[in-house]
């Protein structure tokens, strides 16, 4: 299985890291593109002074290939490269707008445009709050074009007790959307909900 994964400059680097780790655990080939602001994000939120693919994969034994963001001549820029879907996580409003409007002057937006034209699965994990009217219009444009807008929007019905639980919730949803099996706790099950401990807000 081949999944294109892009990291743009929106908050939520942990979502990307956990998603990539889930792909690697499932044995998927990960084709990774990181925007310059995505790199800045990895520094600010994960402390990566330089991009560390092993740390994103969670192991040195992985099948993550890094592609140059500026190389729109990369194989990811062509429909000839068959893959099983593309996930942009996290997705900035800037990248959301580029993809919505068919701009393809970097490898993230170009690979996304190709994914749409080939009618393959494209998931955009947008993160912004509140949404501008432009973001909302772009959600509509992208959804009409066949993309899946999956905002980084964790549920709390599994009663998370750590940041990791919250991150896993989103990463698990993304792995589901990518069609990848995983063991992260994501699904609501009425027989398996941890009751709140006494003192917690109910
Ligand atoms: C640490 C950090 C966090 C950011 N968080 C967001 C965010 O959550 N959503 C967003 O749309 N932009 C965010 N930005 C701004 C984008 O990075 C900026 O608009 C940039 O041009 C996006 O470029 P890219 O889409 O090529 O990655 C953030 C920037 C930094 C440095």
Image (tube, rainbow, N blue to C red):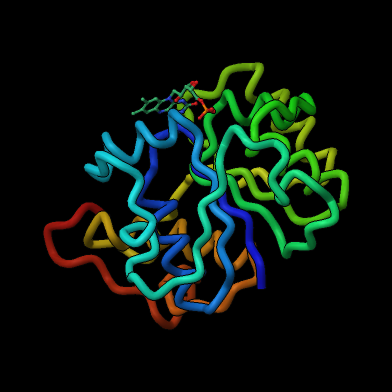
Give the image quadrant in which the ligand numbered 1 is located: top left
Instruction: Give the left or right position of residue 23, taking residue 163 as reference.
Output: right
Q: Quadrant of residue 83?
A: bottom right
Residue drawn at point x = 84 percent, y = 38 percent: 144
Quadrant of the frame with the N terminus: bottom right
Q: Quadrant of residue 11?
A: top left
Please report the residue visible at 33 percent of the width from the left and 52 percent of the height from the top.
52
Extreme residue in the bottom direction: 191
At 56% across and 62% down in the image, what residue appears? 30
Residue at the farthest left position: 199
- Asked whether, in this view, residue 70 is left or right of residue 103, the answer is left
- In the rendered view, tell whether residue 45 sits above or below residue 81: above
Answer left or right for 26 relative to 162: right
Disc count in the image? 0
**In percent of the image, x 42 and y 66: which residue is there?**
21
Residue nearer the viewer, 201 or 186: 186
Q: Is residue 59 left or right of residue 187?
A: left
Residue 151: % across, % down: 55, 42
Q: Position of residue 51 (x, y in %)?
A: 35, 45
Camera-side residue: 189 or 36?
Answer: 36
Residue closest to the eye, 199 or 70: 70
Closer to us: 157 or 186: 186
Q: Is residue 134 above or below residue 79?
A: above
Q: Is residue 112 positioned above or below 183 on the image?
A: above
Residue 159's image quarter?
bottom left
């Amino acid at each position: 299985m081949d999944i294109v994964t892009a990291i743009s400059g929106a908050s939520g680097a942990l979502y990307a890291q956990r998603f990539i780790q889930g792909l690697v655990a499932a044995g998927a080939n990960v084709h990774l593109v990181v925007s310059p602001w995505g790199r800045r994000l990895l520094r600010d939120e994960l402390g990566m002074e330089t991009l560390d693919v092993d740390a994103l994969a969670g192991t040195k034994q992985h099948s993550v290939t890094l592609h140059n963001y500026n190389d729109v001549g990369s194989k990811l820029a062509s429909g000839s490269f068959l893959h099983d879907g593309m996930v942009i996580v996290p997705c900035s409003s800037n990248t959301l707008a580029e993809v919505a409007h068919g701009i393809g002057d970097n490898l993230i937006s170009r690979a996304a445009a190709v994914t749409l034209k080939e009618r393959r699965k494209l998931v955009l994990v947008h993160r912004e709050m509140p949404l501008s009217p432009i973001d909302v219009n772009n959600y509509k444009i992208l959804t009409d074009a066949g993309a899946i807008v999956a905002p980084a929007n964790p549920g709390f019905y599994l009663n998370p007790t750590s940041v990791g639980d919250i991150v896993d919730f989103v990463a698990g949803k993304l792995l589901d959307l990518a069609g990848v099996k995983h063991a992260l706790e994501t699904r609501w099950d009425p027989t398996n909900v941890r009751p709140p401990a006494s003192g917690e807000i109910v």
